[in-house]
C-alpha cells in the first residue's frame, strides 16, 4: 500500500487551519504534518523539506508570497485553494511556482486526489483551462524542440494528450483502464523521446504541437 | 479500445504473468443486518491495494457515474475507495446483470427457501473470510447453482452468458496491462466459475486474495 501523503497546511486563519486539519486527517490517504500561518523560510526549510505537499488557503493570494513559499519549500507540490479558475488569477500563481489548484466547489474526495497528485510532482489544473494556461505559460519562452529522439507511439500520444488536458496520472490510468504504474512507464518514455525533464515541459510540448487527447494533432479540446 | 493499443500497453512490460484474485460477496443480502460492515471490505481492499479492480458493472454505468443500481459494497465501499486511491476501476459487467432465477409453483417456493438459506449464510458469517473460504463459500455456490437449476431456462442461459462476458472482460483487462495486480470483486456465485476459467489463460496467475 502506498504510504499516506504528508502535507503542510498553510493558512492565515487559525480557525480555518483547524477545520482543514480535522477534515483532512479523516482521509485515509493523507497525513497532516502541520498547520502553519507563517510561510516557511530558509530557516524552516529543513523541517519542511520532507513534506511533499503544501496546501495553501489564503484569502488574498499575492504572487510575492507564493514565490516566498516556493523558496521555502523548493521541492514540494504547492496546491492552492482559489476563488475561481480564472486564467488571470491562476497564471501568475503558476508562474510563481504553484503546481495545482482547487476551488471552493471541490469535494473532499477530489481535494484528496489533488493533494496526492501534486505530492507526486503532478500538475493539477482544471481541464477546461489547462491547455490555455499551459499555452500562456509558454508564450515568449523557448519550448522544447520539435525534433524527437524517436517517434511517439499512438498510446504515448494519447497519454500525452490527456496530460496536456490537466489530467493526473490516476485520471489518465482510469481513462485508459490501465494501472497508474503503466501510465508512469508511458510518461517516462514520452519524456525521453521529447527530451524533456518534467511533466510541465511535456504538457507544454503537447500544447505547442497541438496534441489532443486522442493522440492526434489538431484542435485542442 | 483497439487491439493495437492493448498490445502497446503490453509491449514494454516484462513477460510476467498477471496476478488475478477473485473475491466473492453475497451482494444482494447487504440490505439485511450482517455481522460485519462494509468497512471490513474497504480495509481489506485497501490492504491488498490492487492496481486494477474489476467490478461487475457496465461501461455505461461507469461512464455516467450512475451507481444507483449497484450493490452497496460497490456503491458505498469499493467505488469511493478507488476514487481516493491509485486503484483503477475496470467495469467488466458487459450489458448488465442477468435476471435472478424465478419460477412458478413449487419451484418458485423452493427458490425462495434457498435464498433464505443464502441470507442466513450471509448474516451468520463472522467476516469476509467466511464468505470466501470454507464451507460457507462452497455452500453459497451450491445454493446459487440450485436456484439457477430451479429457475426458468432463459435465466440459466442469461447467467451463463453474463458469466462468460465477465471472464472475457477480465482476461482483456489482464492482457491490456501485463504484470498488473488485479482484484475481481463479484458475487460469490460467480467465483467458482471465474477462477477455473482464468486458470486456463496462460498469461494469468490466479491467486488467493490474501496473496495478491
Image: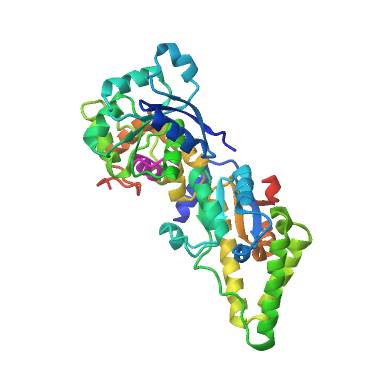
Vertical position of residue A81 compared to residue A141: above or below: below
Colour approach in the figure: rainbow
Q: How far across and how far down the image is residue A136, in percent? A: 23, 33
Quadrant containing the N terminus of chain B in the rendered view? bottom left
- Which stretch appears magenta? A158-169
Left or right for B121, reference A57: right
Write down the quadrant of residue B24 in the picture: bottom right
Q: How far across and how far down the image is residue A150, in percent? A: 40, 35
Vertical position of residue A159 compared to residue A57: above or below: below
Farthest residue toward the front?
Answer: A15
Residue A168 falls within the magenta-colored stretch: yes
Q: How far across and how far down the image is residue B9, in percent? A: 49, 46
Farthest residue toward the right?
Answer: B135
Vertical position of residue B110 compared to residue A18: above or below: below
Residue ID at (68%, 84%): B107
Q: Is residue B57 or residue A39 the one in the foreground? A: A39
Left or right for B135, reference B94: right
Write down the quadrant of residue A125 in the picture: top left
Q: Is residue A197 visible?
A: no
Residue ID at (34%, 28%): A98
Residue ID at (22%, 30%): A139
Q: Is residue B12 or residue A201 the one in the foreground? A: A201
Number of callouts? 0
Q: Is residue A171 visible?
A: yes
Vertical position of residue A107 compared to residue B155: above or below: above
Q: How far across and how far down the image is residue B196, in percent? A: 70, 61
Left or right for A78, reference B159: left
Residue A26 falls within the magenta-colored stretch: no
Residue ID at (40%, 59%): B64
Q: Main SS of the magenta segment?
A: helix
Farthest residue toward the top?
Answer: A43
Amino acid at each position: 500500500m502506498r504510504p499516506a501523503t504528508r502535507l503542510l497546511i498553510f493558512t492565515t486563519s487559525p480557525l480555518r487551519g483547524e477545520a482543514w486539519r480535522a477534515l483532512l486527517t479523516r482521509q485515509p490517504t493523507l497525513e497532516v504534518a502541520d498547520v502553519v500561518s507563517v510561510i516557511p523560510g530558509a530557516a524552516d526549510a529543513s523541517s519542511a523539506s520532507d513534506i511533499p505537499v503544501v496546501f495553501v488557503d489564503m484569502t488574498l493570494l499575492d504572487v510575492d508570497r507564493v514565490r516566498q513559499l516556493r523558496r521555502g519549500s523548493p521541492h514540494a507540490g504547492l496546491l492552492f485553494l482559489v476563488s475561481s479558475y480564472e486564467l488571470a488569477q491562476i497564471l501568475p500563481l503558476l508562474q510563481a511556482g504553484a503546481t495545482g489548484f482547487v476551488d471552493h466547489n471541490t469535494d473532499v474526495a477530489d481535494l484528496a486526489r489533488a493533494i496526492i497528485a501534486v505530492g507526486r510532482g503532478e500538475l493539477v489544473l482544471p481541464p477546461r483551462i489547462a491547455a490555455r494556461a499551459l499555452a500562456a505559460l509558454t508564450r515568449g519562452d523557448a519550448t522544447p524542440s520539435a525534433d524527437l529522439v524517436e517517434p511517439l507511439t499512438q498510446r504515448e500520444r494519447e497519454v500525452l494528450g490527456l496530460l496536456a488536458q490537466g489530467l493526473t496520472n490516476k485520471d489518465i490510468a482510469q481513462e485508459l483502464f490501465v494501472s497508474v504504474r503503466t501510465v508512469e512507464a508511458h510518461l517516462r518514455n514520452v519524456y525521453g523521446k521529447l527530451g524533456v525533464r518534467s511533466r510541465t515541459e511535456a504538457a507544454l510540448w503537447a500544447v505547442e504541437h497541438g496534441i489532443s487527447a486522442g493522440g492526434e494533432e489538431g484542435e485542442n479540446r | 479500445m483497439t487491439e493495437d493499443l492493448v498490445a502497446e500497453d503490453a509491449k514494454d512490460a516484462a513477460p510476467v504473468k498477471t496476478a488475478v484474485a477473485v473475491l466473492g460477496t453475497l451482494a444482494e443480502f447487504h440490505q439485511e443486518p450482517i455481522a460485519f460492515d462494509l468497512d471490513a471490505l474497504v480495509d481489506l481492499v485497501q490492504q491488498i491495494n490492487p492496481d486494477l479492480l474489476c467490478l461487475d458493472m457496465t461501461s455505461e454505468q461507469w461512464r455516467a457515474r450512475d451507481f444507483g443500481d449497484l450493490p452497496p459494497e460497490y456503491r458505498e465501499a469499493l467505488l469511493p475507495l478507488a476514487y481516493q486511491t491509485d486503484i483503477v476501476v475496470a467495469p467488466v459487467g458487459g450489458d448488465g446483470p442477468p435476471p435472478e432465477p424465478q419460477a412458478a409453483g413449487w419451484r418458485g417456493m423452493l427458490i425462495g427457501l434457498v435464498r433464505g438459506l443464502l441470507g442466513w449464510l450471509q448474516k451468520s458469517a463472522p467476516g469476509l473470510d467466511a464468505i470466501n473460504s470454507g464451507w460457507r463459500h462452497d455452500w453459497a455456490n451450491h445454493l446459487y447453482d440450485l436456484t439457477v437449476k430451479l429457475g426458468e431456462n432463459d435465466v440459466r442461459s442469461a447467467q451463463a452468458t453474463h458469466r462468460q462476458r465477465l471472464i472475457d472482460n477480465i482476461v482483456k483487462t489482464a492482457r491490456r496491462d501485463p504484470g498488473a495486480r488485479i482484484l475481481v470483486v463479484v458475487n460469490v456465485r460467480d467465483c467458482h466459475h471465474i477462477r477455473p476459467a482464468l486458470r486456463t489463460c496462460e498469461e494469468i496467475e490466479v491467486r488467493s486474495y490474501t496473496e495478491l
